Image (tube, rainbow, N blue to C red):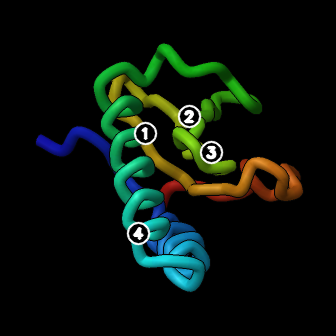
Amino acid sequence: MATERYHPFFAVDLATACSYYDSIASTLGNRFRANVRSAIRDVVNRPDSFGRIGGDFRGALVDRFPYVVVFASDDGVPSIYGLRHAASDQADWFDRTMP
């Protein structure tokens, strides 16, 4: 049984951010990846503990990086919609729908 679902563009969001941090230093990129994995693990383990950021969407901050994992919880199963920079325009954070 799957513990979470991912929007197809989540991989693009993650690759873009990882590429940026890898261009600075591979150790920084690796640390970013590890912190994103940790944030997603927290989302899977306790999705209802994160605050609502718009409608049914919730946000989990990535430790030590200015990124937010945007997700919704459907019957306790998190649907992860995106990885967004915290300072980006939030207007498009909630436009994605799960295919």
Judged from the image, the secondary structure of the residue bearing numbered disc 1 is helix
| Relative depth, front residue between 79 and 23 | 23
Answer few, some or many: residues within 10 Å of disc 3's Cα (few below 14, many 20 plus, some between 14 and 19): many
Q: Which residue is mark 1?
A: 39
Give coordinates of residue 57: x percent, y percent.
64, 34
Q: Which residue is mark 2?
A: 60
Q: Nearer the viewer, mark 2 or mark 4?
A: 4
Residue at image position (56%, 34%) is: 60
Counting residues from the start of the chain, the first of labels 2 and 4 encountered is 4
* Left or right for 57, reference 90: left
Residue at image position (37%, 30%) is: 42
| Relative depth, front residue between 83 and 99 | 83
Give coordinates of residue 87: x percent, y percent.
83, 52
User: How far apart in space, not on screen, are marks 2 and 3 (Cα)?
Assistant: 5 Å
Counting residues from the start of the chain, the first of labels 3 and 1 encountered is 1
User: How far apart in space, not on screen, are marks 4 and 3 (Cα)?
Assistant: 20 Å
Q: Amino acid at mark 4?
A: Thr
Quadrant including the N terminus? top left
54 vs 93: above or below:
above
Asked whether the residues under the numbered discs 3 and 1 touch, taking CB atoms below 8 Å apart as contact, a structural biologist would say no
Residue 68 badge: 3
Judged from the image, the secondary structure of the residue bearing numbered disc 3 is strand
